[in-house]
């Protein structure tokens, strides 16, 4: 049997609402004509609302990593010193991209499963008396571990040092608080296939006036990612190269849904889903990788019980129940599995998937009383009704 409607619990791609799918199912239009001009203005404005920013914002037809590369080549010149904070795979990726484009990267690593410590960042920054650090790279939500960084504190720790802060918010924006302007974030990148409830293929980059100045003196190689040309075309209601039109149609509808729900409620919904999942797995006797205080609202990483590999659990969830969860990356392969609760995920789907997980654990000899985990989740459902 091929299944069209899976329980897709990945930290991207995430499920796409039916109205968004329908919106994408439209004939093409002239991408240099008046209809697109209007569409482009509307979606750019809508994405800015999710970003909570008045800064410039450009949209690239690309995976999230494309926007990460754009965030390097437009603001960092070869030889520039860059402080790259990493708490996992995606922090490492940002550092790698910067190094590939000639930056002098100072890596600041924290143990996987923990947050970056703003005091350590503050220390490094305050020791840089000659102001050689040009940019600080940081991940908002580290998707490989399920930990959210304290971006507000990290931004504050830079203080009046002139370094710009560049944030990879691909899996966090729209799921957790990240008010771009209020927190003084110079460059923020995100992508369509996470909280935006769209298929993969679009990525976004906001640029503060300060970062825009930096970009004017930036000497790195770029063509496709050139910010200056993207902004020039944006003024005309166009993109420099052919836009992913169908995804723009989808984005218009996804933004309509998100803004109708209201950003505060969207964030609350993600928090609720996180709390359901964490309550469920803890009641089953499983351990989340991240502590409560630093737990992501986008996904939950779960340590596989001893003797049962994470990939066995994932395979059985998929084969028996069409439940899709992500595996661990790199050294976390087979050690953890990651339950996405990002974007258009319905709480009842989480309950069903957790019920499936209980069965899989039981069948692998894990000491569990069937129903114990999901009872806790059901109790939270009831509490919410009463609230
Ligand atoms: C998903 C993700 C990306 C981008 O991944 P792509 O596969 O390039 O879309 C970047 N950073 C984080 C934190 C992510 O979760």
Image (cartoon, grey):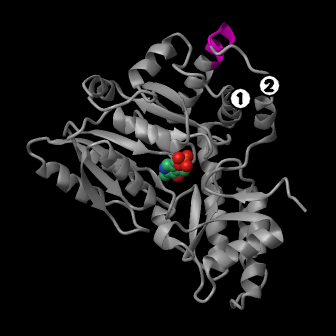
**Which is more N-terminal, label 1 or label 2?**
2
Position above or below: 14 against 358: above
Say whether residue 246 is left or right of residue 264: right
Q: Residue at x 67, y 72 (%)?
A: 280
Q: Quadrant of residue 339?
A: bottom right
Q: Is residue 311 magenta?
A: no
In the image, farthest residue toward the left: 130
**Which of these two is toward me, 6 or 254?**
6
Please tell me the numbered disc located at residue 26.
2
**Lateral position of residue 146 relative to residue 18, left or right:** left
Residue 183 in view, yes or no: no
Question: Do callouts 2 and 1 mark residues in contact (Cβ within 8 Å)?
Answer: yes
Q: Which mark is residue 246?
A: 1
Measured from the top left, where is residue 153 in percent x and y? 33, 50
The residue lying toward the viewer, choosing from 27 and 165, is: 27
Which quadrant is home to the C terminus?
bottom right
Magenta residues, start to end: 32-39
Distance from the alpha carbon under mark 2 to that under mark 1? 7 Å
Neighbour tally class for label 1: few under 14, some 14-19, many 20 plus, Cα within 10 Å: some
x, y percent for residue 323: 76, 65
């Amino acid at each position: 049997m091929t299944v069209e409607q899976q329980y897709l619990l990945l930290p991207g791609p995430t499920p796409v609402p039916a109205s968004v799918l329908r919106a994408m199912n439209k004939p093409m239009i002239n991408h240099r004509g008046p209809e697109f001009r209007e569409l482009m203005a509307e979606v750019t404005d809508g994405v800015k609302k999710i970003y909570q920013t008045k800064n410039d914002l450009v949209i690239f037809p690309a995976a999230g990593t494309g926007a990460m590369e754009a965030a390097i080549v437009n603001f960092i010149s070869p030889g520039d010193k860059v402080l790259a904070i990493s708490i996992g795979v995606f922090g490492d990726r940002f550092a790698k991209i910067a190094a590939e484009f000639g930056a002098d990267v100072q890596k600041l690593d924290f143990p996987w499963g923990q947050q970056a410590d703003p005091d350590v960042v503050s220390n490094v920054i305050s020791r840089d008396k000659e102001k050689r650090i040009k940019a600080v790279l940081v991940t908002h939500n580290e998707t490989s571990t399920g930990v959210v960084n304290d971006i507000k504190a990290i931004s504050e720790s830079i203080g009046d040092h002139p370094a710009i802060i560049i944030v990879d918010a691909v899996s966090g924006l729209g799921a957790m608080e990240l008010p771009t302007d209020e927190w003084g974030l110079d460059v923020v990148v995100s992508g369509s296939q996470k909280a935006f409830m769209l298929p993969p293929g679009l990525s976004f980059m906001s640029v503060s006036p300060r970062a825009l100045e930096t970009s004017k003196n930036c000497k790195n190689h770029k063509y496709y990612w050139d910010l200056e040309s993207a902004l020039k075309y944006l003024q005309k209601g166009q993109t420099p190269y052919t836009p992913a039109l169908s995804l723009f149609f989808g984005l218009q509808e996804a933004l309509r849904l998100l803004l109708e729900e209201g950003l505060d409620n969207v964030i609350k919904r993600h928090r609720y889903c996180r709390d359901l999942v964490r309550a469920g797995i803890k009641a089953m006797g499983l351990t989340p990788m991240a502590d409560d205080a630093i737990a992501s609202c986008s996904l939950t990483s779960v340590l596989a019980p001893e003797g049962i590999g994470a990939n066995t659990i994932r395979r059985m969830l998929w084969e028996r129940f069409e439940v899709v969860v992500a595996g661990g990356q790199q050294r976390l392969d087979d050690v953890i599995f990651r339950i996405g609760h990002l974007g258009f995920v319905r709480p009842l789907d989480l309950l069903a998937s957790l019920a499936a997980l209980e069965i899989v654990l039981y069948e692998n000899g894990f000491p569990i009383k069937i129903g114990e985990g999901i009872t806790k989740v059901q109790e939270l459902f009831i509490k919410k009704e009463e609230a």
